[in-house]
């Protein structure tokens, strides 16, 4: 019955688009019924999060239009089982308008600027703090925090997790204008694990090329000094390790430069630095830029020598993530590489072991910590002129139920998850269809977006993916022990207008200046004392790093004091 109604409503929506000359939105907004009428005529209720939000009349007469970018592999959201299941359980009818990420990037400003032709909400909105402040001041965005009574799941999150709330509040007026994505696994701050080809390493050891290491040491958790690693990489470079008759196709050490995972940052840990892609980290409560530390110069020169000597594969600085993964398949060419799991990168993962963070020339063995946030602010925004917004927010609130969150994030029960739960009452993933990877199945069937998967969910509601469990086990064993005390990632921070202006004036130039110099140093033999001194002068002068640092420090202090 409901699916028939849904199809009929979808047809009416298409016809209205044609009648209105295209969008179906201009002059076609429903009028808000008011909460009293919503309750009396349409059965609107929000307190029982397992019951329908609307009655059958509400399902037929009310609808919402949501605009969203989607992955190219994903089904149209209107056709996704999880979205159809949500309609069945809530009676809230949503028409999704899906576009590619590139189209959304092109249309974003037009959508926000045209009050006569806007959807009710944008999913995968990707809104930054500055954009939210700008459109909030113009009364374009709905202050969601004014409607929390209709969102019991989300309200509970804000009450129990003031740290999450602090990452969402608009500093200018103390309100919340966007819905977040929250996926807490403890993975994102450590996006690099070092893998070593144990067979190649054994050959190097047996040839006497690597002092102080035996073949018996070649197991997960291996400790290597930078000198021992360098000796191995030299052996990999100079010998036909894969036995194909070509001694030039081996890649001693590989990564994806400046990628969100599997990047170069952990190599700086050899010098006691907690570097990341922004070169910005919290140390003992202070916002710190690693590029102002003389150890950064020493580390860069050390690594530049590895690049010059072809111990680091130079392709690492120009390849995409997809190329890196493709190059790892088939014939073994990687001697060592950074990634989350060897199983994703190479065809024979059993040939690779996990190496602890490398020990540097001064005895430092430090894991670097990324700023990849587990709380994604700005994921969904609702426009201020959305009719019957109480219903839409009650609908979005269902996404924060952990059972729904799991399906939004990975795919629905019946396709990705078994119909029956395990002995602990938790969702368990089905066997992958033959010939399909976990990523392919997920991207086809999961819209991703707003969710709440915390420790409670992983311990009581849903089993992690097998590969996520493997990542967590490895990080717990071989990464966490090397995380220094007092070092934390920089969280999502909210800024004032004045602070945003400072960042707008200087931060892009700072990032570009660091990026340009660093790649030049790494690829061209390092940085001289004079060039380093000039670099430091420019950081404090034309780049105004002190002003940027103060903005982050003030915002971080506010975050701590919420």
Image: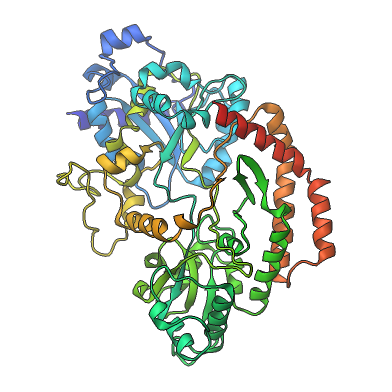
**253 or 407: nearer the eye?**
253
Q: Eyeballing the image, is 537 above or below 478? A: above
Percent position of residue 396, x then y:
37, 28
Rendered residue at 65%/70% (across/down): 303
x and y percentages locating residue 534 in the rendered image: 84, 57
Tell me what residue is drawn at x 28 percent, y 39 percent: 82
Is residue 97 visible in this depiction of the protein?
yes
Q: Pinpoint residue 121: horizontal percent, then vertical percent.
A: 45, 28
Left or right, 499 with reference to 121: right
Q: Residue at the spot x=14%, y=46% of the render?
A: 423
Give 130 or 353, whichever is nearer the viewer: 353
The quadrant in which residue 347 appears is bottom left
Q: Is residue 526 left or right of residue 147?
A: right
Seen at 52% across and 41% down, the residue is: 104
- Left or right relative to 434: residue 499: right
Q: How many marks?
A: 0
Q: In the image, is 463 to the left or to the right of 562? A: left
Residue 113 in view, yes or no: no
Figure quadrant of the C terminus:
top right
Display colour scheme: rainbow
From what the image shows, is residue 342 above or below residue 59?
A: below
Q: Is residue 225 above or below residue 368?
A: below
Residue 246 percent across, percent down from the top left:
51, 90
């Amino acid at each position: 019955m409901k699916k028939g109604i849904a199809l009929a409503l979808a047809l009416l929506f298409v016809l209205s688009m044609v009648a209105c000359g295209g969008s179906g939105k201009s002059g076609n907004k429903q009028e808000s019924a008011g909460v009293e009428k919503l309750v009396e005529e349409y059965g609107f209720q929000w307190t029982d999060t397992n019951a329908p939000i609307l009655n059958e009349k509400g399902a037929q007469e009310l609808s919402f239009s949501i605009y969203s970018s989607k992955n190219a592999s994903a089904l149209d959201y209107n056709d996704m089982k999880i979205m159809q299941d949500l309609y069945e359980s809530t009676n809230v009818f949503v028409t999704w308008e899906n576009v590619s990420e590139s189209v959304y990037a092109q249309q974003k400003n037009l959508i926000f600027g045209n009050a006569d032709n806007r959807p009710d909400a944008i999913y995968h909105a990707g809104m930054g703090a500055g954009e939210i402040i700008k459109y909030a001041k113009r009364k374009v965005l709905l202050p969601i925090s004014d409607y929390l009574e209709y969102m019991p799941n989300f309200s509970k999150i804000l009450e129990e997790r003031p740290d999450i709330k602090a990452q969402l509040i608009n500093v200018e007026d103390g309100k919340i204008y966007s819905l977040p994505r929250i996926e807490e696994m403890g993975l994102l701050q450590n996006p690099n694990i070092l893998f070593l080809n144990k067979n190649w390493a054994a050959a190097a050891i047996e040839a006497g090329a690597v002092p102080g290491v035996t073949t018996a040491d070649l197991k997960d958790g291996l400790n290597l000094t930078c000198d021992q690693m360098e000796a191995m990489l030299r052996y990999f470079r100079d010998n036909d390790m894969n036995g194909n008759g070509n001694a030039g196709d081996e890649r001693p050490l590989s990564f994806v430069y400046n990628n969100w995972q599997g990047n170069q940052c952990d190599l700086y840990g050899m010098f006691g630095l907690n570097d990341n892609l922004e070169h910005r980290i919290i140390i003992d409560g202070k916002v710190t830029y690693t590029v102002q530390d003389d150890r950064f110069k020493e580390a860069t020169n050390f690594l530049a020598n590895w690049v010059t000597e072809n111990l680091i594969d130079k392709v690492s600085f120009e390849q995409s993530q997809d190329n890196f993964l493709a190059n790892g398949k088939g014939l073994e060419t990687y001697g060592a590489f950074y990634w989350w799991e060897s199983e994703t990168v190479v065809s024979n993962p059993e040939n690779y072991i996990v190496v602890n963070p490398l020990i540097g020339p001064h005895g430092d063995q430090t894991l670097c910590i990324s700023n990849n946030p587990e709380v994604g602010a700005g994921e969904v925004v609702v426009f201020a002129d959305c009719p019957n917004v109480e219903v839409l927010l009650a609908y979005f609130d269902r996404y924060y139920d952990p059972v729904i969150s799991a399906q939004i994030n990975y795919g629905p029960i019946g396709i990705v998850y078994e119909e029956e739960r395990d002995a602990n009452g938790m969702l368990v993933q089905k066997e992958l269809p033959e010939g399909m990877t976990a990523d392919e199945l997920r991207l086809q069937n999961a819209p991703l977006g707003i969710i709440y998967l915390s420790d409670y969910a992983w311990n009581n509601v849903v089993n992690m993916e097998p590969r996520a469990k493997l990542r967590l086990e490895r990080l717990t064993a071989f990464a966490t022990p090397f995380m220094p005390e007092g070092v934390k990632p920089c969280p999502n921070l909210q800024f004032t207008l004045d602070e945003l202006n400072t960042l707008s004036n200087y931060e892009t130039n700072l990032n570009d200046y660091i990026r340009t110099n660093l790649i030049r140093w790494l690829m061209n033999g390092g940085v001289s004392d004079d060039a380093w001194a000039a670099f430091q002068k420019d950081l404090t002068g034309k780049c105004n790093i002190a002003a940027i640092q103060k903005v982050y420090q003030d915002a971080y202090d506010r975050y701590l004091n919420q």
